[in-house]
Amino acid sequence: MYDAIIVGARCAGAATAMLLARAGHRVLIVDRATFPSDMRQSNHLLWPPGVEALSRWGLLDELVATGVPPIRTGRMDVGPFAITGGFPPSGTVREAYAPRRRILDGLLVEAATRAGAELWEGCSVDELLTDDSAGPVEDGPRVRGVRGRGPRGRTFRATAPIVVGADGMRSVVARTVGAPTYLERPATLGTTFTYWSGVPTPVTTLYPRPHRSVVAFPTHDDLTVVSVNQTLDDHRAAGTDRPAAYFRTIAEVAPDLAEQLHAGRREERWTGSVVPGFLRRPYGPGWALVGDAGYLKDPCTAQGMTDAFHHAEMLAEALDTTFRGHQPIGDALAAYERRRNDAVLPMYEFTCDRARLAPPTPAMQQFFAGLRDDPVQTERFFGVFAGTVPVAELFGTSASAA
């Protein structure tokens, strides 16, 4: 019997497993993938607070050694002019990175297994085991383990006092236990992206325009990720002609970038995504959720991986206190939900507002114009996206004011 079973070995799951294993707990990680393994739908960006987490965990040097380029500057082209600035630090960290997931996730999985976590790769969880003999439990039967299929169709089962769903927005764990959602927001944009060689960019560049935007940033292997965001209606209307809509949008929004793409080379297939927003109650009898399984939002502000790291730390701390007998598990996990929500709600509303791709208000146009000659305020503006300046500190208590 394990102390915890983690379903999903990506950013949230591998980090949670690593932290619990380092604290001396017996952890099993189950994932249907085999590692190293890519993750097609990822925003890639790891902002300074996420990079600082890697530094705390002793993994930053390992990531840097993979050759991922640091991103020290943000640039926003609003049409008539562009603003450029650095990121306010998180601790001593000012750099962001945009690693390929096969590299970052593999690094985290290796760190978790080094710490003592057991990894079952190529294993799909089909069912949660419940303790029906315990009698009625508030919020449903108590989860006590998992059952599923591994390589060559072999069945497996494992038990633990807690099963953690770190299995993404379509979480099997969340669906099986009926985890309730709240603060739901429908998807309002669609994203199409791919990877380019011969398109050098040392900075993260955003080209916001009414009803669409373009983003470019560097990743591993001298490649540049170039994404196009469109309103949901336009994204769906493109249908199978989405690549044509991609090039047409870039030509309209960022003609200089369009010229670079014509001179460069597309290195991988197209990836598209449509992402709604919601928070899920992240715990119940014998189960917990972390990462996108418990909190999802549009990738336009690229908060997903950084949030996954922070929530992994919160959840691992909560579980550690219960495993050591310092706090009842229900109290610890309720505190985990409160801490998570307090940390994410301002950025959640800001992200949902940005995902509308609405034209800038006159007040926002004036705000951008004021940034041109104000490097301090410009850095603070980029700090909102980087997660090192609170949204309310720059825009007030309402994200829609931006």
Image (cartoon, rainbow, N blue to C red):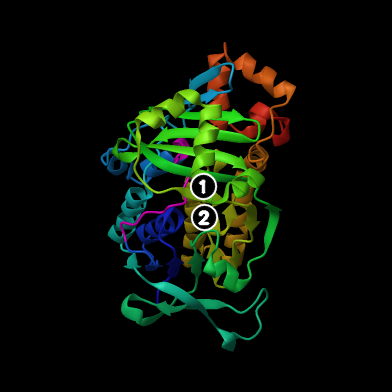
Task: Give percent across and percent down for residue 294.
Answer: 57, 58
Q: Give the crowd class for mark 1: few <14, some 14-19, many >=20 residues within 10 Å.
A: many
Kindly identify which residue carries mark 1.
Answer: 304
Give me the residue at 49% from left, 56% from top: 317
Give me the residue at 28% from left, 43% from top: 62
The disc label shown at residue 269, or none: none
Q: Give the crowd class for mark 2: few <14, some 14-19, many >=20 residues within 10 Å.
A: many
Q: Quadrant of residue 360?
A: top right
Three-letter amino acid code at the position of disc 2: Gly
Question: Can I make out residue 145 in this image?
Answer: yes
The disc label shown at residue 291, or none: 2
Task: Give percent across and percent down for residue 64.
Answer: 30, 38
Task: Give percent across and percent down for residue 264.
Answer: 35, 32
Query: CB atoms at circles 2 and 1 under 8 Å apart?
Result: yes
Q: Is residue 354 magenta?
A: no
Task: Give percent across and percent down for residue 254.
Answer: 51, 26
- Horizontally, residue 197 falls left or right of residue 243, namely left
Q: Which residues are magenta?
A: 35-49
Q: Quadrant of residue 2?
A: bottom left
Q: CA distance from mark 2 to mark 1?
A: 8 Å
